[in-house]
């Protein structure tokens, strides 16, 4: 269903962009029909590249998918900037002499921003630090550090070497506990086993905890979860564990998948049921149900999934489904942090939303 929506949106954007190319050098001199045929070819290339990449035919298919998705993002940026120009000039009816120049500037800026996004997408994620007063945390645990990471998306565009570099970056934080917030691997990847050595280097005194995201559920979900177990992680699916007296770490299934299912259980309530007294950290891949988590006594909730929008101005679109896109929020007595994630989905492109790893220092309240 997501692929259908994605390709549908790509078709609309491609038709709009190629239709508005009149006045551009080279392509703008072609007839409208010819430009629309070229637009159809571009859309077909995106569709084929996505199919081939998902089918995992080898390294060449990964490259093809990356090129196709990079083209899609460039078209998205061009469509967004053109829409601003067309809205300001009412499709050239106002400022008719300036409108073509503004459209050319929009196309040029889209190319510049695409280049900047490629550069930013190749950079290592930054470290974002927080200090959180956690209700119920025993004094003896005051000052412990948490490394939290989401959305590594290892397995297709981002391979074992990239994952090993990220694992090393996490370990330099010297965390007392490591929390993995889902979409750590691509479930449809055929090289999941190659990721095990890098994942196995993640170790912390209080353990490594993980929850699945929607991408672990793609293709071979049982293999993705087995990979986590083989790496020595404690996987939390609608349950809790206590790494130390007075501290509870709970985790839920991917809530976006649950929202669309016919399941009648309440994952958040199930994950937090019958837990001992003390401080509670709730892990959720998707930033949903945070009010419920706060009402059930959670002190800190961590989520990812949104990538912070990944490509500006897509963050405004993401906000329609997930009002809390990134950053720190206070939900009553609960602190809620949504991370942009360390990796990327699709093409290795980010614009004004760099990848991040979280280092959180917990304080006794």
Image (cartoon, rainbow, N blue to C red):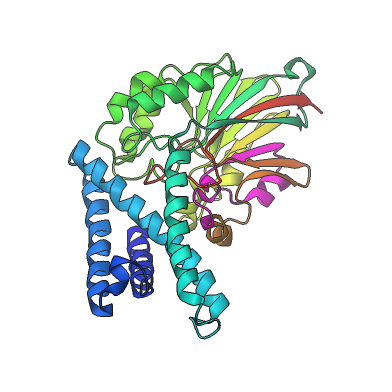
In the rendered image, residue 154 lying in the magenta stretch gets the answer no
Q: Is residue 13 above or below residue 342?
A: below
Per the rendered image, the range of residues in magenta is 287-314
x, y percent for residue 298: 69, 39
Query: Which quadrant: the C terminus?
Result: top right
Q: What residue lies at 51% left-to-right and 76% top-to-bottom?
A: 98
Q: What residue lies at 39% left-to-right and 42% top-to-bottom?
A: 348
Q: Is residue 101 visible?
A: yes
Q: Is residue 88 left or right of residue 215?
A: right
Which of 308 and 75 lies nearest the eye of the viewer? 75
Considering every residue shown, the one lying at the far right of the view is 365
Q: What residue lies at 38% left-to-right and 27% top-to-bottom?
A: 162
x, y percent for residue 100: 45, 74
Q: Is residue 309 left or right of residue 273?
A: left
Which of 246 and 161 lies nearest the eye of the viewer? 161
Query: Which quadrant: the N terminus?
Result: bottom left
Q: What residue lies at 65% left-to-right and 48% top-to-bottom?
A: 290
């Amino acid at each position: 269903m997501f692929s259908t929506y994605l390709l549908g949106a790509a078709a609309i954007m491609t038709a709009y962009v190629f239709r508005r190319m009149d006045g551009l050098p080279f392509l703008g001199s072609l007839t409208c029909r010819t430009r629309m045929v070229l637009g159809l070819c571009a859309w077909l290339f995106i569709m084929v590249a996505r199919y081939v990449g998902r089918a995992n035919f080898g390294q060449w298919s990964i490259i093809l998918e990356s090129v196709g998705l990079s083209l899609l993002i460039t078209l998205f940026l061009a469509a967004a900037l053109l829409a601003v120009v067309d809205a300001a000039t009412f499709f050239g009816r106002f400022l008719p002499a300036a409108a073509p120049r503004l459209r050319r500037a929009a196309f040029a800026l889209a190319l510049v921003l695409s280049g900047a996004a490629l550069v930013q997408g190749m950079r290592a994620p930054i470290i974002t630090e927080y200090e959180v007063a956690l209700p119920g945390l025993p004094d003896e645990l005051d000052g412990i550090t948490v490394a939290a990471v989401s959305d590594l998306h290892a397995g297709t565009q981002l391979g074992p070497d990239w994952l090993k570099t990220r694992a090393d970056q996490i370990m330099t934080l010297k965390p007392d506990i490591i929390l993995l917030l889902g979409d750590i691997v691509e479930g449809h990847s055929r090289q999941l086993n190659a990721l095990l050595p890098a994942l196995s280097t993640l170790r912390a005194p209080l353990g490594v905890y993980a929850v699945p995201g929607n991408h672990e559920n793609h293709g071979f979900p049982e293999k993705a979860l087995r990979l986590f177990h083989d790496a020595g992680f404690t996987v939390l699916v609608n349950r809790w564990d206590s790494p130390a007296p007075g501290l509870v770490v709970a985790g839920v299934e991917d809530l976006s998948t649950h929202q669309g299912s016919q399941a009648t259980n309440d994952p958040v309530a199930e994950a937090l049921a019958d837990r001992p007294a003390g401080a509670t950290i709730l892990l959720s891949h998707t930033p949903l149900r945070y009010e419920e988590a706060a009402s059930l006594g959670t002190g800190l909730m961590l989520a990812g999934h949104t990538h912070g929008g990944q490509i500006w101005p897509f963050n405004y679109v993401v906000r329609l489904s997930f009002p809390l896109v990134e950053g720190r929020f206070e939900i009553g007595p609960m602190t809620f942090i949504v991370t942009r994630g360390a990796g990327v989905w699709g093409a290795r492109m980010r614009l004004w939303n760099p990848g991040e790893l979280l280092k959180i220092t917990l304080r006794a309240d």
